[in-house]
Image (cartoon, rainbow, N blue to C red):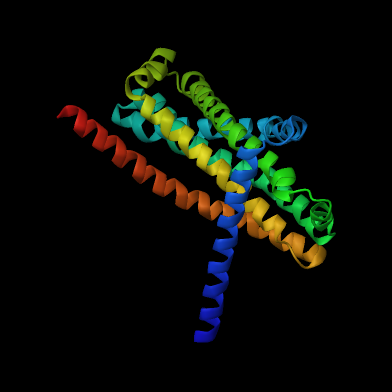
Amino acid sequence: MLVLVRDKSIRLLEMIGDYVSLVFEVFGAALKRPPAWSLIREQLYHIGVMSLSVVAITGFTTGFVLAAQAFYQLGEKGMAGVTGVLVGKSMITELGPILTAFMVTGRVGASMCAELGTMKVTEQIDALKSMAINPYAYLVAPRFLAGTFMIPLLTLFSTMMGIIGGYLIACNLFNLSATSYFTPMQIHITLFDVATGVIKSIIFGILIVTVCCYRGMNTTGGAAGVGKATTQSVVTSYILILLADFILTMALNMIHQEMKYDWMK
């Protein structure tokens, strides 16, 4: 039993080391000599444009649910006016970044891992190396740059759709006025809330692309290995996104509170 635990611990440390090494390799490849624009453009379209529909539906329906829950839970207590703030704050700081990251992981991350995994088991990546082509620069860096740029934009789009969805439900179904829905947002939603959502989405984008590409680049075992690696990449990305969300929430709010305290002094 102890031997098994030791072996698994060593393997976990090796995987973490390999992942960190890949991240540095990708950063270096992306910054030293950016990939060709045609490669980046293709990934921008694949990650961003092709994800608009699923992100829009997710954000829209989430806004529906948030507005309905807020009205039913708070309306009878005379607090229906905070529906807009609840929807806006929730979508901007938490649900927008999290749900967008989950949808992109399921649609794009799994595709990245499967594509790179297939190239790995069919020795296409080895062929690139034999031609003196850096696979990190050619395969991973364009995905990294596109994902880091597009996922925050998708998050903002999802957040906007959620707020619009909440507005439609609150105003058309529960007869809340547009003024009562939007005016409190201008008072209670701050630039810090928007910055929190953007920072989270950037970190989530980096995690999704690097984790899925790492799993794909280290796939073994033929077709079965590709399927296993794809599943592992999605599950690992979900777990890391949730952990990163908690850490970022605590860290950003602590920094914000410290800045407010220093300013008050």
Q: Image quarter for residue 19?
A: bottom right
Position in image of residue 2 (x %, y %): 49, 85
Position in image of residue 63 (x %, y %): 51, 31
- Residue at left offset 67%, top offset 32%: 48
Q: Quadrant of the C terminus?
A: top left
Q: Is residue 159 above or below residue 101?
A: above
Q: Is residue 158 above or below residue 186?
A: below
**In the depicted view, which residue is nearer to us: 57 or 35?**
35
Could you tell me if residue 81 is visible in this image?
yes
Position in image of residue 174 (x %, y %): 45, 23
- Residue at left offset 77%, top offset 31%: 38
Q: Image quarter for residue 229?
A: bottom right
- Residue at left offset 74%, top offset 49%: 134
**In the depicted view, which residue is nearer to us: 45 or 17?**
17
- Residue at left offset 58%, top offset 50%: 23
Could you tell me if residue 107 is visible in this image?
no
**In the depicted view, which residue is nearer to us: 173 or 191?**
191
